[in-house]
Each structure stands twice: as C-alpha cells, then as structure tokens.
Image (cartoon, grey):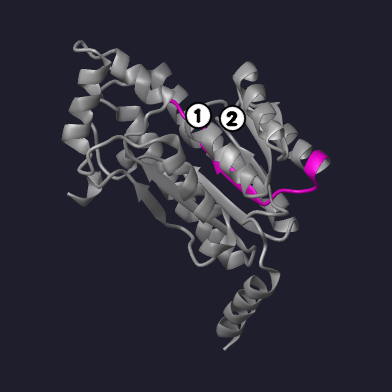
C-alpha cells in the first residue's frame, strides 16, 4: 500500500507541475565535457533547463562549451577537474552549491582508452585507465551523493561502454574498467534505494560513436580513417552507421529527468544493435 501511494503521488506531481522543460530547476555536473559526448550532454541538459557545471582538464575547450551554452540563454559554468583528484571533486561540488544552490544530476563521462592486450598492457597504463574510468566515478559519486540527497534527490548517470558487456582482446584495461563501472553503479544504486535517498544510479553503454576517442583509434588504422570506420560499421553496427554524441546525450537526458524515476541499477545500451546479435 505505501509503495503504490508513493507512486501515485509522483504521478500527481508530474501532472500538476507541467514544466515547460524536462530539467527546469535542476543542477548538473558533467565530466569530460569539453568535447564529444560530454559536450553534447552539457548542451542538451542546459537546453532542457538545467544549470550545468561543465568540467574537464581541457580548459580552453571546456570554457568554450560553457560559453556557447550561455550564448543560447542557458546557465553554465566551467570548472577544471581531474577526476582522479579527491580534492578536485570537493572543489567542483562546492562550486555547484555556491553558484547554483545544490546538485541533482551527476554525469560521469570522462574516460580514456589505451588499446593493448593482456600481454602488452603496462602496469602504468593499467593504473591510468582504471583510475580515470573507475576511480573517478567512484570519487564523484562518493562526494555527490550527500549533496544530491540534501537537494531533494536526483540521478547519477555513468557512461560505460558496449565493451562493458563483452570482452575485447585489444582493450584489456578499458574492458576491466567499464565492467567495474557497471558493478559500481549497481552497488551505489542499491545503496541509495535502500537508504531512501531518492537517488537513481544507472549506466549508459554506448557502441561506436564518432567522438575524439574513436577518431584517435581510426587514425591509427593502416588503411585510413574511412576504411577503418567502414570496417567497424560492417562488423559491429547492424543499423548501418556510427552513432553521434547527441544519440548518447538523449539517453542521458532520459535517465536524468523524472520520466525515468522507476529506473535504477540498470544499463541503457545505445549501440546501433551490436549487442542484439
């Protein structure tokens, strides 16, 4: 009975409030937001009404993203962030509170890939990939959860990969980090749910998306970029074309807004049908 009543209450709030935009009044932090999926996500969340703290190590590009958002009449600030720095996370979250008044949405998008197999992966490369792709989201969630809770609840979206669902011989550390991120997401989701925090935690698993990360891989191909992209599409993407950053940003928007309030501890796979085969 109480659970049904709570659900009815949420539905009632949705009907009566009828916001013009899906994230009006929300405050978001996006990591790795200077380009690619992070930049597209920051722009979309802002267009839907969120105040966005754009974070990245690339100061020039990060500031440009925030400036472009402000030119569209939305709210955005840039803050430099190294996601493996606990002190950096504390500063970023403090700034979100100071400038916007709280925090409702965290998008852990920053990531790195260093292609190597189990025999050729160096310990230094292993540690770097695990630190950025797994420890970074851990630190972000650890310090964001109390603030999101005190702001009334919200959503955490962790950007994993389709390689978090399978193995890949040439991506040893990357696969390990993204599989780990899915496990971390589930642990955090269950914890928040059972504590009654009203914080949902989910992952998105993108397939091949035309981002700077993919571009670097394509340029290393001996046959050239276009031939490499065609090979990837033929081998991995039944729908017949690679994804764009906006494709993933729209998935983030769904998980960030109240329309997904029954989704937590799960994966949203956006990969052009690759894992359907």
Left-right relation of 65 to 204: right
Q: Is residue 111 magenta?
A: yes
Give the class, few, some or many, for how many residues have Cα within 10 Å of label 2's Cα (few <14, many ≥20).
Answer: many
Outermost residue to the bottom: 1
What percent of the width, then of the height, locates residue 45? 60, 45
Q: Decide which of 97, 118 is in the foreground and name it.
A: 97
Question: In the picture, which quadrant includes the N terminus?
Answer: bottom right
Instruction: State yes or no: discs 1 and 2 in contact (Cβ < 8 Å).
Output: yes
For the residue labelled by badge 1, is the local secondary structure a helix, a strand or a loop? helix
Give the class, few, some or many, for how many residues have Cα within 10 Å of label 1's Cα (few <14, many ≥20).
Answer: many
- The residue drawn where x is 22% and y is 33% is 233
Image quadrant where residue 78 sits: top right
Residue carrying label 1: 132
What percent of the width, then of the height, locates residue 120? 27, 17
The magenta span reads 99-112
- The residue drawn where x is 54% and y is 39% is 41
**Residue 139 seen in the current view:** no
For the residue labelled by badge 2, is the local secondary structure a helix, a strand or a loop? loop
What percent of the width, then of the height, locates residue 150? 75, 57
């Amino acid at each position: 009975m109480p659970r049904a009543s709570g659900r009815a209450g949420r539905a009632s709030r949705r009907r009566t409030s009828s916001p013009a935009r899906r994230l009006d009044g929300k405050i978001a932090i996006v990591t790795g937001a200077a380009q690619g999926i992070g930049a597209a996500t920051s722009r979309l969340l802002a267009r839907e009404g969120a105040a966005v703290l754009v974070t990245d190590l690339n100061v020039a590009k990060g500031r440009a993203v925030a400036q472009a958002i402000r030119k569209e009449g939305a709210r955005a600030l840039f803050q430099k962030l190294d996601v493996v720095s606990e002190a950096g996370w504390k500063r970023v979250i403090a700034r979100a509170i100071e400038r916007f008044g709280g925090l409702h949405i965290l998008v852990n998008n920053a990531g790195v890939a260093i292609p190597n197999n189990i025999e050729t992966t160096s310990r230094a490369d292993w540690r770097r990939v695990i630190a950025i792709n797994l420890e970074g989201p851990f630190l972000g969630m650890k310090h964001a959860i109390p603030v999101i809770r005190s702001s009334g609840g919200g959503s955490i979206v962790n950007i994993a990969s389709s390689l978090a669902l399978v193995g890949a011989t040439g991506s040893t550390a990357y696969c390990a980090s993204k599989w780990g991120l899915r496990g971390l997401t589930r642990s955090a989701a269950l914890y928040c749910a059972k504590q009654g925090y009203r914080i949902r935690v989910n992952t998105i698993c993108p397939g091949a998306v035309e981002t700077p990360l993919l571009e670097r891989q394509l340029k290393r191909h001996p046959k050239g970029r276009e031939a490499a992209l065609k090979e990837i599409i033929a081998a991995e993407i039944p729908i017949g074309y690679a994804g764009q950053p906006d494709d993933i940003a729209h998935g983030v928007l769904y998980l960030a807004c109240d329309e997904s309030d029954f989704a937590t501890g799960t994966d949203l796979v956006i990969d052009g049908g690759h894992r359907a085969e």
